[in-house]
Amino acid sequence: MNQETYHPGEKVPQSGIYRCDCSESHEFTSTDVEGKTFPPLPSACTGSSWVLKTPAHPS
């Protein structure tokens, strides 16, 4: 599945729960609000960006 990725500091395009893109067995998530900026990734995360997991207002 090819999903769009977002880097820390970029504007959040859609409110929802985002997960880090690392391929480790753990999963770091962040609840983000449209128009705000993405937070830094957790220090234990080996990924480089956030990916939308669950939209706040699914269509």
Image (cartoon, rainbow, N blue to C red):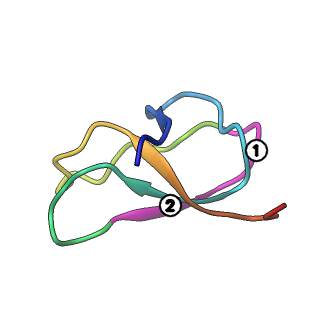
**Residue 29 lies within the magenta run:** yes
- Where residue 18 appears, as percent x and y from the top left, is 51, 57
Q: State the residue lying farthest toward the front.
A: 1
Q: Secondary structure at mark 2?
A: strand
Q: Is residue 9 left or right of residue 49?
A: right
Q: State the image quarter where residue 57 is shown.
A: bottom right
Residue type of the residue flagged with mark 1 = Glu
Tell me the residue at 61%/36% (across/down): 37
- Residues rendered magenta in the picture: 28-36
Neighbours of disc 2 within 10 Å: few (<14), some (14-19), many (20+): some
Query: Disc 2 designates what residue?
Result: 30
Q: Secondary structure at mark 1?
A: loop
Residue type of the residue flagged with mark 2 = Ser
Tell me the residue at 51%/29% (across/down): 9
Q: State the image quarter where residue 54 is shown.
A: bottom right
Image quarter in which the C terminus is found: bottom right
In depth, the one of 44 and 52 nearer the eye is 52
Query: Disc 1 designates what residue?
Result: 34
Q: State the residue lying farthest toward the top.
A: 10
Tally the numbered discs.
Answer: 2
In depth, the one of 52 and 2 nearer the eye is 2
Q: State the image quarter where residue 28 is shown.
A: bottom left
Q: Is residue 22 left or right of residue 32?
A: left
Tell me the residue at 30%/68% (across/down): 27
Neighbours of disc 1 within 10 Å: few (<14), some (14-19), many (20+): few
Distance between the alpha carbons at the discs numbered 2 and 1: 13 Å
In depth, the one of 33 and 18 nearer the eye is 18
- Where residue 56 appears, as percent x and y from the top left, is 75, 65
Q: Is residue 2 left or right of residue 58?
A: left
Q: Are marks 2 and 1 in contact (CB under 8 Å)?
A: no
**Residue 44 lies within the magenta run:** no
